[in-house]
Image (spheres, coloured by chain):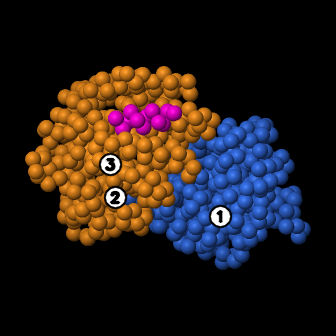
Chain colours: A blue, B orange
Amino acid sequence: MTARRTVIDVLKGETVFPPPVWMMRQAGRYLPEYRATRQRAGGFLDLCYNPDFAVEVTLQPIHRFGFDAAILFSDILVVPHALGRDLRFEEGHGPLMTPIEPTGIEQLDEAMFHVNLQPVYETVRRLRAELPAETTLLGFCGAPWTVATYMIAGRGTSDQAPARLFAYRHPEALAKLLDRLADHSADYLIRQVEAGADAVQIFDSWAGVLDEASFDAFCAAPVARMVKRVRTAFPDVPIIGFPRGAGSLYDSYRAATGVTALGLDWSVPLSQAKRLQQSGTVQGNLDPLRVVAGGRALDEGVDAILAGLGGGPLIFNLGHGITPDAPVENVERMIARVRAGSHR
Amino acid sequence: MTARRTVIDVLKGETVFPPPVWMMRQAGRYLPEYRATRQRAGGFLDLCYNPDFAVEVTLQPIHRFGFDAAILFSDILVVPHALGRDLRFEEGHGPLMTPIEPTGIEQLDEAMFHVNLQPVYETVRRLRAELPAETTLLGFCGAPWTVATYMIAGRGTSDQAPARLFAYRHPEALAKLLDRLADHSADYLIRQVEAGADAVQIFDSWAGVLDEASFDAFCAAPVARMVKRVRTAFPDVPIIGFPRGAGSLYDSYRAATGVTALGLDWSVPLSQAKRLQQSGTVQGNLDPLRVVAGGRALDEGVDAILAGLGGGPLIFNLGHGITPDAPVENVERMIARVRAGSHR
């Protein structure tokens, strides 16, 4: 029970080399065993809300690759779903919801929130019991802004224009929505930690489409509110913030939000990543397509990250989720190269 | 003939306040007169290759709003089209091309390049003759990387995955393609300057999807090659580089490429923009959706840019093209507020 969890050590600021490694979307369609379970489960949400299936797919990449962290299998949109918003996943369309109107924000159904999310907490409990002691269990949720983009548009969009326009036209309504999402998402993370999560990650996949004033107000401030609320319950739980695409705004994000560590997308240059690492742990940031391509492109990408960031607190990861077309043998090659760690 | 062209003054490093203003895609679907001409012309390419129509739509926003710069109406994909690649625009699908294979790069038809582009040069000649002397005429082209993303995918994509994978799998072929595009695009700009363009802009719309090593090799290096070639013919012509979404990599882009001025997308924070402005002119960077929203969102966006960047060389612009749903009266309001310039 006291086995070393390197991801936690690194999140606490320790430099470990070779660094620990996991992958965003490591339980996903690139794995044949995931596709098999998914087929048995039926729909995507059946996978998320059934602890038997969710535990099974969460553990699959741990069994196959021995990653240093497992991340709860779920979806960022279970939070609005648990607040009474409809949600369905259609093949080839991603998530579909009824777009929320400004007046709909008052009608979110908060009473059943944690009841609806019990299967997720049960999944976390079982995972912590089944995982090897040295494997870190990560909980997660979406950041309020990113979740709001789907609630407002009713679907994924390439530029999040519906949510950005909503923000400009109904700033007070958006602020109210973000506050509610922040508080419920924080409570959701707190319950995950109570159930056994060792650390949590906040995914802000659409942080990169905002101008500076909007980023501060809609991305950084709600995450700061969440971090404060989680820390009130669990002062020491490590929190990884992942404001994907934030570019130069990464520099102010950690100070503004108080997150423990920064998840870096693959567009963050190593010079900036090194600067960010001066003030805390970083996680990332291999282009997932280097794993699809394999060969020299993969090796060079791994080596650049190890050489640039291996001298400080680093959790090796991709700069975004692994894609369905990534060959399993390239994932193996990536892990082996990270763990060989010969390029410090 | 000697009337003051403020855009050129600012491109040469002068601070002018209130700053000159124009908008990317200012000749576009948000204008009823553009939609009328487009209907008469037939297809989108008919508009690009017919000097009568192209001159007409280029001048429409100048007549209506009195912008300080006119930008040649054309499309970045006329360059591969003039090299013999097929190109068509279908309503609701954007550009469609036959994806180029590595072996296709040797077969680009270079002999007819400038012949095919004669209508564009004719458009530039007529525009310079018809424009008021104080209005700057901008030529433009796409950057090699961005043009290559369409040539490789055969269409617009949300993440440019086909081109990024091509880059990882066929690095030598991509380098060859980028070199050819760089040289032809530079020659294309040179002809535009010969025909009367006062300055040129290089659009790298998909610069933001690359990791650092790829950005240096596929985005910055080919633009540097272009700048060198254009400067050999015209040492003093101002060149605006617009590596949209480059984030922190904006900082190295100007030095690496030698462009005169930087076009900033709306995600560039004002703190970074100010730093970039220390070493030269910047252009931007209002979120186009603030123009769609209007009202307070528009005013606050304009004021923030004037307050943050008005003390140095600034060309006021959007951070990306104006969208078709932008009300004309909001464009008027934006221009009036910039020209009132009361927020320095």
Badge 3 is on which residue?
B239
Badge 2 is on which residue?
B282
Q: Amino acid at mark 2?
A: Val
Chain ID at mark 1: A
Which is nearer the eye, A4 or B166? B166
Label 3 SS: strand
**Is disc 2 in the same subunit as disc 3?**
yes
Residue lying at 17% horizontally and 48% vertically, measured from the top left: B135
Badge 1 is on which residue?
A282
Q: Quadrant of residue B58?
A: top left
Nearest-to-viewer mark from 3 and 1: 3
Most common secondary structure along the magenta stretch: helix
Chain ID at mark 2: B
Q: Dot 2: few (<14), some (14–19), or many (≥20) neighbours within 10 Å? A: many
Residue A265, x across and y down, in percent: 59, 55
Which is nearer the eye, B120 or B29? B120
Left or right relative to A320: residue B95:
left
Mark 1 to mark 2: distance in Å? 31 Å
Mark 3 to mark 1: distance in Å? 37 Å
Label 2 SS: strand
Q: List the single residue furthest toward the front.
A: B232
Q: List the single residue furthest toward the right.
A: A1
